[in-house]
Amino acid sequence: MEEWIEQLRNSVSTLEKLKAYISITPEEEKAITTLNTKWGTTPYFASLMDPDDATCPIRKQVIPSLKEKENHYGISDYLIWKENRDTDEVRPDSIARQYYDRIAFTVTDVCANYCRHCFRKELVVDRDLKLRMDVDEGIQWISEHKEIRDVLVTGGDPFILSDDKIEYIIAKLREIPHIQMIRFGTRTPIVLPHRITEGLKKVLKGYHRVPIWVNTQCNHPKEITERTARAVYDLLSCGVNVGNQAVLLKGINDDVETFRTLHQKLLSVRIRPYYVFYCEPAPGIDHFRTSVEKGAELIRDALRGHTTGLAQPMYVIATNIGKIPLMPDYYIMEKTEKEYRLKNYKGQYTTIPNIPE
Ligand SMILES: *Cc1c(COP(=O)(O)O)cnc(C)c1O
Ligand code: SF4
C-alpha cells in the first residue's frame, strides 16, 4: 500500500490513537468525547505535536476545543452567505463564485487534517451543510461559461482524491479552450507530504498550455519539516508553483517572532507566501480570531523591510464580495503640491517630488 493511503487509513481520530502521541489534558478529552464534530489528522502531522504542551500550535489546530461550542460572533449559514450560494445565478453546488473570471470548484469534502479553524467547517468539519460535489456537473458548467479563465480546485482537500480522479479533472479542464490556468488548494504538502508520489507527479508534470499552480496552508513554522521541503521540491520539479495561504490565528501565529519565522521558513523550503487570511467569521471559531488590524500590524512590524521581499504575503479578508486587501498603509505621511513625504519600516523619513498630472 502507498504510504499516503496508509497515513489516511491510520488517521489519528480517536482518543486512544491520540494518546500514543501526547498526554491529553482533561479539557481536550472532554471536547473529544462531547462535541459532535469530525476531527483527526495524519500520524505524520500528529508526530509534530508537543506531547506535553496543550498550547502547541499543532495541537490547537487539530484537537477539538470546548470553545467551539461558543459562538458569539460567527455568522450562521456562513458558507451560503460567503460563497454566494443564495443568488439568482443558477450554479452547481460545486461552484462558488465571487468573481467574473474565476471560480472555486469544490470537488470533495474529505481532508487529511480537519483544521479546527476551517471556514468551511459547516461542510467539512461539522457536516451539517450538504453539497453535491458532482465533478462532471461542475465541468459542464465551466465549459458553458466562457468568461471563466481560472479554476481553483478546492474542497475539502482535492489531493485526497486518487491520481486517476485528479488526472481526470485536469484533463477535462484542459480540454476547455477558455481555461488558462488550474489551481489546487491543498494542505497535503504540510499535513501529508507523502501524497506527492511518483504517480501524482506523473499526473502533474509536463509542459502544457494550461499550467497548474498549488496553494497550500501552513500557519506555523513547526509545520515545516524535511518532508515538506521534499514534497515542495517534487511539485516544483513538475513545473508546479507552490504558494502559501496562511490563516491568522490567535495564540498560534499572531506574534511578531512567529509570524516572521513562518514566512522566512516557507521560503527556505521554496514555498512562496501568497495570502495571510483574516480568520473568517464562521460559527464556532471565535477563539481563533484576532482584531482585523492585527495582520496589518504584523506585516508592518515583522515582515515589510524587516526581511526578504519575497516573504511578503498579501493580508486579506475573504468575504461574500471577494477578498479585500487589508495591508498596512503607513508609508505616505504627507502629500503637498511639491512632494510626498514617505516613511520606512524603521520610522525614517524621506521625500520624493510630486509630479503634477
Ligand atoms: C479565493 C477565491 C478565488 C481566488 O481568488 P484569488 O484572489 O484570485 O486568489 C476565487 N473564487 C472564490 C470563490 C474564492 O473564494
Ligand atoms: S484542509 Fe482546508 S478544507 Fe480541510 S479542514 Fe483544513 S482548512 Fe478546512
Image: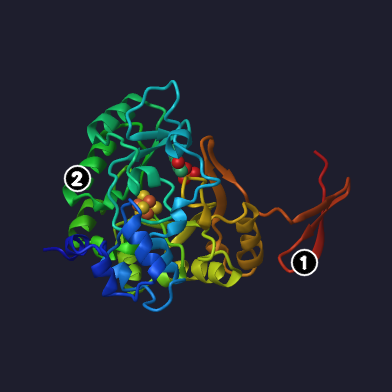
Mark number displayed over residue 265 = none
Q: Residue at 57% across / 53% down in the picture?
A: 315
Residue 225: horizontal and vertical position, in percent?
A: 36, 73
Image position of 336 (left or right of 272): right
Residue lying farthest to the bottom in this orientation: 52
Q: Say above or below: 297 vs 95.
A: below
Q: Nearer the viewer, residue 166 or 240?
A: 166
User: Residue 16 is drawn in which quadrant?
Assistant: bottom left
* Element under disc 2: helix
- The earlier-in-sequence mark between 2 and 1 is 2
Residue lying farthest to the left in this orientation: 1
Q: Which residue is mark 2?
A: 165
Mark number displayed over residue 347 = 1
Image position of 68 (left or right of 112): right
CA separation, marks 2 and 1? 53 Å
Q: Is residue 323 visible?
A: yes
Q: Nearer the viewer, residue 230 or 160?
A: 160
Judge the density around disc 2: few (<14), some (14-19), many (≥20) Cα neighbours within 10 Å.
some
Q: Residue at 52% across / 65% down in the picture?
A: 253
Amino acid type for the residue under numbered disc 1 = Gly
User: Residue 173 is drawn in which quadrant?
Assistant: top left
